Amino acid sequence: MFRVQRPLFSLAEDVTIEATRVRLGGRVAAMEVESPGPGVMRVRFAPESLRSHPSHPELPVKRSFAREGMELGESGPRHARRGLSVRVTDGDAAGGVASEPGSEALRIAGADCALELALADGAWRFFDAEGRCVASSLGYEGEFAAGYPMARHRARVALAAPEGEAYLGFGEKVGPLDKRGMRFTFWNTDVHPFPHTDPLYASIPFFIAVRDGIAWGLFLDEAARSRVDVAKRDPDRIVWEVEGPELDAYLIAGPRPEDVLRRYVALTGSPFAPPLFSLGAQQSRWGYESAEEVKAIVRGYRRRGLPLDVVYLDIDHQDGYRPLSWDFGRFPDPAGLMHALGAEGVRVVTIVDPGLKVDPAWGVYRDAKSRDFLVRWERGDELVGEVWPDPAVFPDFTRAPVRRWWASLHHEHVEAGVAGFWNDMNEPSSFSLSPGVRGIPVAEGKRAPGHTAPLGPTLPDEARHGDRRHIEVHNAYALGMARAAFDGQADAAPSRRPFVLTRAGYAGIQKYAAMWTGDIRSDWSHLEAALPMLLGMGASGLPFVGADVPGFAGDATGELLARFTQAILFAPLLRNHTAKGTVPQEPWRFGEPWLGLVREALLLRYRLLPSLYTAMMAAHETGYPPMAPLPFAHPGDPYAFAAYDQYLFARGLLVAPIVRPGQTKRMVYLPEGAWAPLTHALASEAVIEGGRHVVVDAPLDRLPMFLAAGHGLVATAPALHTTTAEWAEIAWHLHPGAGASVSLYEDRGDGPVDGTWTHVTATRTETALQLERTTRGEGHARRAKERIVLHATPPARRVEGAMASESLDHALVLDVAPDWTSVAIHF
Ligand code: MIG
């Protein structure tokens, strides 16, 4: 399909090879290769067709929205390049470029990877550190068409999709874990309610491919609209087409999925370190309409002994839907409200939509207009749309001065006590457009006279963001807005960690925000669909994810609420939320047994907060998601890819939720290894050997959980809200197997990330088990009580180093001094 007819490069006489740099006498297409770090090759390509538009530089100045260390949207190699340019920035000893005399190929070696580039057509083969060819391109292609109101570009790459290769990731997408055989559009879109539609709200153009247990990845750093065919039309190839002038692809070596992910977040930025409170239970509703109602909700929680850390204020708390305003009629004393809720251990997060009400009497609108901060039509007049404020205009968050201004608008809220911001409608969503003529609905793809029809309820492709077209920057709109919300909090409260929840996003959004899956329905099928979505997001560098419990649109039942809460109990974001006009769905609204079941689940979550918090801090360092798909741990196991409704929490706890009504048993796939079933009380039952499917009991009060041999969890005493992550009481739950380790990160739960890591390892000999504890960092945790629970462990003959020991049916429980360093157990 994509055979390039004429050679893109010829080995012209003016090829020069200087140490690590090669330049070819540039003609036809433009290409740039660089290795920005170990295991990563970047290949930029602008197709031949661009030459038909001579004024266009062949490789335009790159302005990446995603790359860490680059100023958002304003950086990248400064010079337009013609021909082929090769840079091995991480070259040192390993790097270099070689070309055999007379050869038609270049071999570019980086650290832990290499690229072989065919000079005839720009096709490449990508090798990992072991010298394995893990990926290859099958060709590039592109077109350019002049036109009004804008010129259209397309650039395509075809990649080999060898049989048996599976594809994880692609961000927020519906479908099974392995996305082979699917097609996706990357175009942030407000959809209500989905699922089983595409595109959705966020675009993360990144995947992890896995074949025979070996992983590699591809990140396409293009915020423009793009479409990918994942071996659907042709089972042997992936075709990714960008509606833009070039393709900027990063090839990422593994060999494990988590290696690819770690390198991806090194490129696009570390997931933000969350404040502890954001991992607590959260409650929301569109709309809690007054301060009194919000207080009553919090009282409802406390009266029933239910944990809660956060309540959200949806759009009704604002004055005429003006972002960052208060309706003082309904919320007469915001600071007082937040103070009162704070006394109950509950924080407030407020919604912020991007659309500004067109209101000349409002300072924010006047500022935005007079400082030229708004998105415009291509002729220069301000683009007016409709969101909750009608008419509405849109700040252009792709520009740094606009972001700085937007950040500053958050200060007053932070000072009044708002603990975080919820960015909604930031695709951006616009129900209609008013180009002089009012109210042309865009959801149906209607076109305003003289303009193109937007794809979905958003702005038209040709709208202007400074000197850029909407189509080029659309997917990055929310990224800039979230960054401003994040920075605004960091400026106003430097000693606290910002919290932002976003609906839309682009690669790099993990630096600033948590993401939820938008408007799912209170329906069992949506619960089932949400699990692989969350896992796909986790595999795409977004560790902090969640879905509305037990669904946004439509009416829930008590059973759905209980099972939904259990199902995503270990999702970092655990928020109960619903739409206007639906039945109330706070935990007590359906009576018993549902209230009791939800309470028990929430208390279990709070018991395991030490593990969740630690997993989030690990994600902050490496990207590894707290809620991970099974192939992350078992990349060579085909059944792991099929298990889309199971996940691994904190690496070692396999969770197999019930996602259907009336079901009290389920089939669980347990990969190779020994698994200790755990009850909600964290007691273990008889070990199950994995490498097979088993049917387990799952009555209403049971979320099936299995702790893998070699892994552990850290539990504390449950509480009604979070306070500090320096736990007074902890229990190390280990399934020692042939040897195990578990980690704990502790700090105040907010402020600088300068806490203490404690690692416990278990080493096995034939007759003994040796436990060691090591601590790194300031040991400022003041522990009152510490305990070790060894699951799947026989009674001990003798224990050295513990204060007391007790044998249960399947476990050995040891009480230890808080400053213990070593325990020996003899069998
Ligand atoms: O057009 O703010 O996804 O969570 O409650 C609907 C009202 C706008 C969509 C969000 C939803 C939120 C709702 N919003």
Image: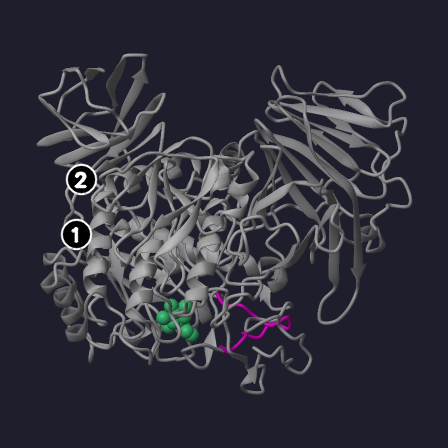
Q: Quadrant of residue 585?
A: bottom left
Q: Does 282 lie within the magenta span?
A: no
Helix, strand or loop for the magenta stretch, by majority: loop
Describe the colour scheme in one phrase: one colour
Residue 503: x and y in percent read 43, 61
Specify the amino acid type for callout 2. Answer: Thr
Most foreground residue, 291 or 318: 291
Q: Is residue 443 above or below residue 545?
A: below
Q: Is residue 769 left or right of residue 188?
A: left
Q: Is residue 208 above or below residue 780?
A: below
Label placed on residue 721: 1
Q: Is residue 122 above or below residue 393?
A: above
Residue 702: x and y in percent read 28, 52
Residue 188: x and y in percent read 54, 62
Q: Which residues are magenta?
A: 373-385
Label placed on residue 716: 2
Specify the amino acid type for callout 1. Answer: His
Q: Residue at x 39, y 80 (%)?
A: 359
Q: Is residue 154 left or right of residue 732?
A: right
The mark that comes first in sequence, 1 or 2, is 2
- State whether residue 353 appears in this view: no
